Image (tube, grey):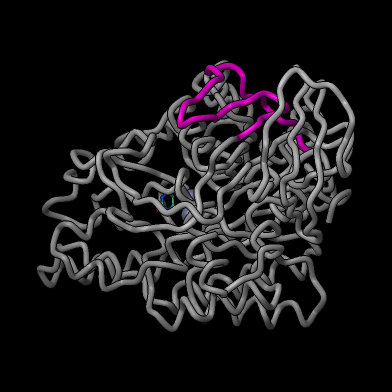
Amino acid sequence: MSVLIKNGRIITATDDYVADIFIDDETVKFIGKNLLVNADKEIDATDKFVFPGGIDPHVHLDMPFMGTFSSDNYETGTRAALFGGTTMVIDFILQKQGNSLRAALEEWQGRSNSNCVGDYSFHMAVTDFNENTKKEIQEMIEKEGITSFKTFMAYKGALMIDDRQMMGLMQEVKKHGGLINVHATNGDMIDFLITKHKSEGQFSPLYHYLSQPEVTEAEASGRFADMANYTGCPGYIVHMTCEGALNAVRNATKRNQKIFAETCIQYLLLDASLYEKDFEGAKWVMSPPLREKKDQTNLWAGINQGLIQVVATDHCPFKWEQKLMGKDDFSKIPNGHPAIENRMELLFSEGVVKNKITLNKYVEVACTNPAKIFGMFPQKGTIAVGSDADIVIFDPKEKHTLSAKTHHMNVDYSGYEGWEVTGKVKTVLLRGQVAIENNQCHIEKGFGKFIKRKKVSQTI
Ligand code: DUC
Ligand code: ZN
Ligand code: ZN
């Protein structure tokens, strides 16, 4: 089906102009003023913004974690993403310690294959780097198109690797043109503090926050950047929350190394005072935890300074009954919060409308940089002739209220209940198909395609 989007204000990471877009065969064919072309469907985008489809490179769907599974599966999660203007996500495969990367890939394919509504890819989390895993890296990059490898410097005993494994992995990943992303917090310090707080009889969600002070993240971020510099491996710090970690990256960039940082929408907008609400604070128990107002200011500045390239979500929803697993012990509350559907609208409303970032910066951090850093540009992440027709038509004036009653995520509360936002996703195209229109999803599970990614050495 061909589509003509007429008269929209097209915003990319670099441009801002009014034109028509003609789409056929999944891709953008022409862009120009007053295009004289017949299409099967015409969409009038007058007075609307036209953005590239959002890319959320940090989500956890149907993930086994802390004794349960994140509550959005590949269908509900990617559909909710589309409602919020995100056309592609990158999810995380977790290797089981003692098992191969291949076994983990097959397990994740078992849950995701034919179930995605939107497009998707995987990062491979390496939780056990050894001589066998080492041999699988090249194959993951060259055969599977999985070019980024996640590491955890925390969650000891389940996910964490030590620095020796990190160095070995970096050396191998660099050799084959990949990238390492990292959950950069000091796991031993955190475990010490969790034990200390519990031995003092402190079990409420507030102590989740107090067990992961800023220094635990700043220290690990600096250590990771140093190891990445030493090995020459490109590095990407996920879910950065605080001034100390940002300063570690700022220092590292003086060495001209390839070090990238992501923050998540919640760290820009919410703060640690939410942990003072007794057990209700469990809604925002995530790792790292929410921080202070001064950290929010630092993160917005980091975006504008180009030190933080991406705003993601770390979408990892758990229903209230799952959060109750930690009713008597904060360390048993499943970590994570729902945001896959809200990221694009919240970032527009709180970032662009409130003059914290420009429109071009908005597209850069929500769409274009994830595509570049993770080896998908220019197929994804921009509006250009030849690119996939992943397009969001957005009303910048429409106001609406976020609520669990109306969201599409499979979770029975919202971290943003009652928030009024300015700007609404109206129509979403995924590879030229109208996916969202009139508040309805028009594509089914199975439409979402696994996107094989290029070596990052080709795009960054
Ligand atoms: N942090 C979370 O809050 N959830 C999933 C994994 C993580 O690192
Ligand atoms: Zn993490
Ligand atoms: Zn995560």
Residue 104, picture quadrant: top right
Q: Nearer the viewer, residue 87 or 61?
A: 87
Of the 4 image quadrants, the one containing the C terminus is bottom right
Residue occupying image coordinates x 58% and y 43%: 125
Note whether residue 135 is visible.
no
**Magenta stretch: dominant secondary structure:** loop
Q: Position of residue 118 (x, y in %)?
A: 59, 29
**Image height check: is 382 above or below 310?**
above
Q: Is residue 393 above or below residue 209?
A: above
**Residue 429 lies within the magenta run:** yes
Is residue 445 shown left or right of residue 288? right
**Residue 177 colored magenta?**
no
Please name the residue shown 59% across and 57% down the image: 182
Q: Which residues are magenta?
A: 428-453
- 223 shown above or below 152: below
Left or right relative to 265: residue 198: left
Identified at 37% across, 65% down, the residue is 289
Q: Nearer the viewer, residue 111 or 11?
A: 11
Task: Give above or below for 412 relative to 210.
Answer: above
Residue 266 place in picture, x, y as percent: 43, 61
* Residue 16 x, y percent position in the rendering: 78, 59
Residue found 72% across the figure and 31% down from its top:
451
